[in-house]
């Protein structure tokens, strides 16, 4: 029986990301990166990442240099070795076309096989910095045009994780995008990936079973209490010079009222 995930990967690897397919296909690409076999995982990275792509995570980073994509391959491989079975779901995707930046909200369940009953259900936002490949393309009328190197509009699209799109654009804009893609063949590659975790999320990797989250939440409330105490003490100390200044002039005014014949110096 054919593996549906493998069929999906073959379809994705056979085409580049365009303006229309970007928001729709990035959830499938992320799922393949997290759940696909090693060969497919590597093929996905080499297809959609630039050779000098960078990867940033709370626990590791690669930097960007010629061939840095090799480090990304190894990071994802080790990630899959530590947790052979990963449940991942995409909550939403937003595309900032002006800055060529893709925001992906997702949650995953990371299970470390060497630790019994270990499970780290975490939420994060992955920021993908994209880049375009300016090439010559032939339009439907046979004209040769240069594709743009940067996006030319302030547009943000949004897609819910269930596949139903809640976008700020109309269907006519979709048709315009599809028509423009056919004419210009603008393609996108991932230049950098930055995984952003709240502290209450990444602590789950280090101290599982909710203990780390509890300690961190208690510390956060304690820090809030310190903020309240610190702000109160500072306001009291800062008000002392003002009170002394006012008291000095009140004494001076009282002397003038009691001895009006003295006048000013």
Image (cartoon, rainbow, N blue to C red):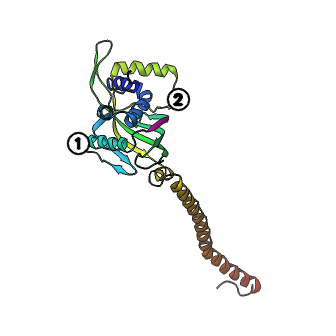
Residue 231 occupies which quadrant of the picture? Answer: bottom right
Residue 37 occupies which quadrant of the picture? Answer: top left
Give the farthest residue toward the top: 141
Quadrant of the image for the N terminus? top left
Observer-nearest of 9 and 237: 9
State the image coordinates of residue 4 (x, y, percent, origin top left): 40, 24
Residue depicted at 28% across the width and 15% down the height:
143
* SS for dot 2: loop
Report the span colored magenta.
85-91
From the viewer's perspective, tell me whether residue 226 is left or right of residue 180: right
Asked whether the residues under the numbered discs 2 and 1 touch, taking CB atoms below 8 Å apart as contact, a structural biologist would say no
State the image coordinates of residue 54 (x, y, percent, origin top left): 32, 43
From the viewer's perspective, tell me whether residue 240 is left or right of residue 140: right
State the image coordinates of residue 125 (x, y, percent, origin top left): 46, 42
Residue depicted at 44% across the width and 20% down the height:
176
Establish if 6 lies above or below 122: above
- Residue behind mark 2: 162
Badge nearest the viewer, 2 or 1: 2
Quadrant of the image for the C terminus? bottom right
Establish if 98 lies above or below 9: below
Residue depicted at 32% across the width and 12% down the height:
141
Observer-nearest of 5 and 230: 5
- Does label 2 or label 1 sit earlier along the sequence? 1
Observer-nearest of 53 and 209: 209
Badge 1 density bin: few <14, some 14–19, many ≥20, Cα 10 Å: few
Establish if 198 lies above or below 18: below
Establish if 4 lies above or below 211: above
Give the farthest residue toward the left: 66
Residue 244 occupies which quadrant of the picture? Answer: bottom right
- Residue behind mark 1: 66
Give the farthest residue toward the right: 258
State the image coordinates of residue 220 (x, y, percent, origin top left): 55, 59
């Amino acid at each position: 029986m054919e593996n549906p995930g493998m069929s999906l990967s073959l379809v994705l690897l056979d085409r580049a990301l365009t303006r229309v397919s970007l928001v729709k296909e990035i959830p499938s690409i992320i799922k393949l990166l997290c759940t696909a076999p090693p060969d497919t995982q590597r093929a996905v990275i080499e297809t959609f990442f630039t050779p000098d792509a960078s990867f940033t995570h709370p626990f590791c980073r690669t930097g960007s240099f010629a061939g840095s994509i090799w480090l990304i391959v190894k990071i994802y491989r080790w990630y899959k070795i530590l947790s052979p079975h990963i449940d991942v779901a995409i909550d939403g995707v937003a595309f900032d076309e002006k800055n060529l930046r893709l925001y992906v909200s997702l949650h995953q369940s990371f299970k470390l096989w060497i630790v019994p009953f270990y499970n780290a259900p975490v939420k994060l936002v992955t920021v993908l910095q994209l880049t375009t490949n300016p090439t010559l393309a032939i339009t439907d009328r046979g004209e040769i045009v240069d594709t743009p190197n940067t996006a030319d509009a302030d547009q943000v699209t949004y897609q819910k994780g269930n596949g139903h799109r809640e976008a700020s654009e109309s269907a006519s804009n979709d048709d315009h995008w599809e028509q423009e893609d056919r004419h210009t063949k603008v393609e996108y590659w991932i230049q950098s990936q930055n995984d952003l975790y709240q502290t209450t999320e990444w602590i789950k990797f280090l101290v599982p079973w909710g203990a780390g989250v509890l300690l961190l939440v208690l510390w956060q409330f304690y820090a809030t209490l310190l903020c309240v105490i610190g702000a109160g003490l500072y306001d009291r100390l800062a008000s002392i010079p003002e009170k002394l200044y006012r008291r000095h002039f009140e004494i001076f005014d009282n002397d003038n009222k009691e001895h009006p014949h003295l006048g000013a110096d």
